[in-house]
Image (cartoon, rainbow, N blue to C red):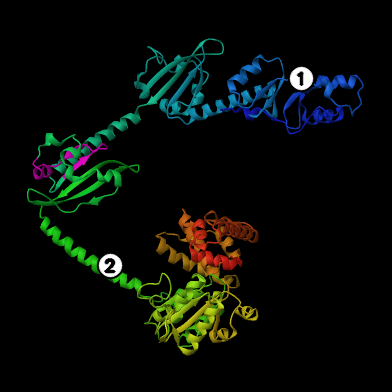
Amino acid sequence: MLEFRDIVTPVDCLVTETTTLQEAVEIFMEKKWNLLPVTDLERNLLGVFTRSGLYQMILEGNPLETAIQPYIKKEARSIRIDTPYNEIEQAVKTSQVGTGVVLDEQDKVIGLLTKTEMVLALLKSANTLKEQLETILQHSNIGVLMTDGSQQMIYANEAFAKISGRTVASIMSRKLGDIFPGLLNGDDMPHHYEKFKSILHVSSYETVNHEEGKILLFQDISELEKMAEELETVKKLKLTIETTLEYAYDGILMTDEKNRITMVSPPMLELFSLEKNEVLHKPVEQVLPQLKLGNVFQSEMAEVSDFNEMNGIRYIVNRIPIKKDGKVIGAIGKVMFRQLNEVSELFKRLQKAENKASFFHEQLQKSESARFTWDHIFSKDPYMEKLKKSAAKAAKGRSTVLIRGESGTGKELFAHAIHNSSARSERKFIVVNCAAIPEDLLESEFFGYEEGAFTGAKLRGKIGKFDLANGGTLFLDEIGDMSLSLQAKLLRVLQEREFYRVGGNVRVKVDVRIIAATNRNLEEMVRQGKFREDLYYRLNVISLNIPPLRDRVQDVEYLIMELMKELNSMLGTSITGIASSAKTALLRYEWPGNVRELRNVLERAMTFAEHGKIQAEDLPDYLLSPLTEQISLAEDAELGAIRKALSQTNGNKAKAAKLLGISRSGLYEKIKKYQLSV
């Protein structure tokens, strides 16, 4: 639909009563308009300055710096932008003025409307409608023929050519009666045209010469015949279902979208002592309310009832919704009552097995164990292979290990593998992320607390991570984010192998091996007084420095292939490779998020891939554009969002994390990353 705004010429200059002759001439030369709307500084219309006024000023010899005010016409034709289109069209037809001033809803000048623009816009709209109509006709399944007043054919679409078996070229410009004799015999009512296996619709129209032309529409009935065949198949299917119900072992009934009974089996009628004519086409709530089939119309989920009883016979009801396009259009009620004692016993055994499985699963969840070995660390880089061998040797002892490297390089994988290849592999492996736990809770998490140690403490107290890891390994991730006060207490545990619980006065002795990890420069933190020097030397007994992925370029392609195998199994995909353009993008990228980022990118790409191979379009946009600019923009946006959320919640981190849609631990990591003071 043509919009009024589309044909308005915007007025982007300001012409007032003080505008000079020179300024007016310059605007006329630049804009090529027939008149200039004159307004005050608030763009309220005062009149118009026309070309004739301009010529008059020049003929009277006015200097160029003369104001146009005396030559302004106060009677200006204006029209509001919200005027209905048909009124505008009528106004243009009857107006003696070639150009009108357009006002907005507040009666401010916004543009000009000329008759020429209106005509051109209408012509463009008509051409557009013509093209749209031709497109519809060319892609329609209905055959179309059109004749002029002398029954000479002026239009035929491809659908008609297909129906008639004639080409469009062989039809055009010929008399309808010459190539299709008898086609127009009879009245204009729709009728069956056997020759083309179609329903023929004939209508008349008035040509530009005021003659009567014909439009013929042919609806192919082969599709209707196919529908009739499908209907016959449905009838046979209904007969099959009715026969199945007749001989069903259990009671079965079906209802429609209004929950009225449409089919019922004899066993169902026998169980409830009913006759078929008492049940069919009746609301199920009226004749069999005990089945509660209406439940599935609300829940849209299949369900099984508890045991019920009828005339001393126990039964259960399986309620199943029938869905179409996501909407429940009926329900099936299956009543099981024959040999239900055996079924009941089976249910009891199944329940006992499920309870036992649930118990073992709960126990397994409670246990803490390392999940990764050296085989999970994929690399072909010589330095990484040497690092794995060094770490495997270090695993045999009991010395503290400090793992260093950027985020996403696999520090936790190394920690798991060290524990699994140590003498403590059968004992617990406890992970503590020092950056994810609020500082005021870290001490109680590490050492536990006694009953009543503080407000909100559990009645029986709580054991800490050192207690849980006794005899095993405690992995301290992001050790560089630990407060100085807690660093002192950790140092004591490392030296004395004992500690006090929060609120307690009894020394607790433990045998724990410490593996620590950080992505921060501990040496610089020691110099700045942010990390205890004595703790640093106590942790840095064996140091493993994992290089970032950008320094292991030859590993990227190897990791891609290995991770794809793992992700195919996890995602259930069947991705066999990667297109060269996608591989080039992956190999040239710097991978600031290291292996973790590479895995996430591959998981996304394999989820989106539709052709058996990862294509460039399956990768995130930032991989396909200048990287530094993209990363900077993303980080700026993230930092701005975090600051706004903290401001809106007055510094409440839990509320801010909820507002941002991330976990509280994730928010703490980002606060550390951007060194925000909150």
Mark 1 vs mark 2: in front = 1
In x, y percent, where is residue 174?
50, 17
Work out how far the residue at label 1 is from the one at label 2, CA to CA, in angstroms: 89 Å
Can residue 509 be seen from the camera position used here? Answer: no
Front residue of this view, candidates 233 and 57: 57
In reply to whether residue 475 is colored magenta, the answer given is no
User: Is 25 rendered above or below residue 596?
Assistant: above
Give the residue number, with chain letter if any, for mark 2. 358
In x, y percent, where is residue 568?
42, 62
Q: What stretch is highlighted in magenta?
A: 252-273
Q: Crowding near pointer 1: few (<14 within 10 Å), some, many (20+)?
A: few
Badge 1 amino acid:
Lys
Q: Would residue 581 appear left or right of 53 to someone viewing this image?
A: left
User: Is 208 rendered above or below residue 40?
Assistant: above
Front residue of this view, candidates 247 and 368: 368
In x, y percent, where is residue 136?
49, 29
Front residue of this view, candidates 147 and 261: 261
- The circle drawn on residue 617 is none
Q: In which quarter of the image is the N terminus?
A: top right
Residue visible at 63% across and 60% down in the picture: 632
Give the residue number, with chain letter if any, for mark 1. 74
In x, y percent, where is residue 549?
57, 71
Badge 2 amino acid:
Ser
User: Is 386 rendered above or below residue 579?
Assistant: below
